[in-house]
Amino acid sequence: MNDYMYYELKGLSEEKLYKVFIENGLEVDDELEEYLIEEEIAKILKTDFDLWIQGISSRSHAMYFRFAKEVKRVYELLLEKYR
């Protein structure tokens, strides 16, 4: 695991972290977008970052599990990109 990249991402603001993931291919589930505004999605990305990047969700709805899988996919792409 690239610790520098992890800490660099973890240190970003909610908005910047979300933007980095979107710019690198994060596709937010339509159902999640239906229930949460962009700022709320950015907040949960930042709040549960350590879980999301492992593909894990602390929330029980399927849309969060899909989001976790997608965040993990993009995180792994970012790690590959900066190795």
Image (cartoon, rainbow, N blue to C red):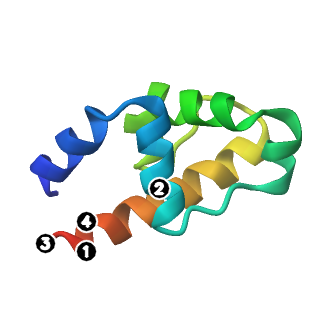
Q: Which mark is residue 79?
A: 4
Query: Mark 3 or mark 2, which is nearer to you?
Result: 2
Q: Which mark is residue 83?
A: 3
- Callout 4 amino acid: Leu
Q: Image quadrant of residue 27? A: bottom right
Q: Which mark is residue 81?
A: 1
User: Which is nearer the eye, 56 or 82?
Assistant: 82
Left or right: residue 76 compared with residue 61:
left
From mark 4 to mark 3, how far is it between C-alphas?
A: 6 Å
From mark 2 to mark 1, how far is it between C-alphas?
A: 13 Å
Q: Are marks 3 and 1 in contact (CB under 8 Å)?
A: yes
Which is nearer the N-term, disc 3 or disc 2? Answer: 2
Which is nearer the N-term, disc 2 or disc 4? Answer: 2
Q: Element type at marker 2? A: helix
- Callout 2 amino acid: Phe
The C terminus, quarter of image = bottom left
Kindly identify the residue that appears in the image at 18 percent across and 69 percent down. 82
Which is nearer the N-term, disc 2 or disc 1? Answer: 2
The local crowd at label 3, few if under 14, some if 14 to 19, many if 20 or more residues have their Cα within 10 Å, is few
Kindly identify the residue that appears in the image at 57 percent across and 49 percent down. 68
Left or right: residue 47 compared with residue 4:
right
Q: Position of residue 39 (x, y in %)?
A: 65, 31
Q: Position of residue 23 (x, y in %)?
A: 49, 63
The N terminus, quarter of image = bottom left
The local crowd at label 2, few if under 14, some if 14 to 19, many if 20 or more residues have their Cα within 10 Å, is many
Q: Are marks 4 and 1 in contact (CB under 8 Å)?
A: yes
Which residue in the protein does label 2 denote?
Answer: 21
Kindly identify the residue that appears in the image at 11 percent across and 48 percent down. 4
Q: Are marks 4 and 3 in contact (CB under 8 Å)?
A: yes
80 w.r.t. 73: above or below: below
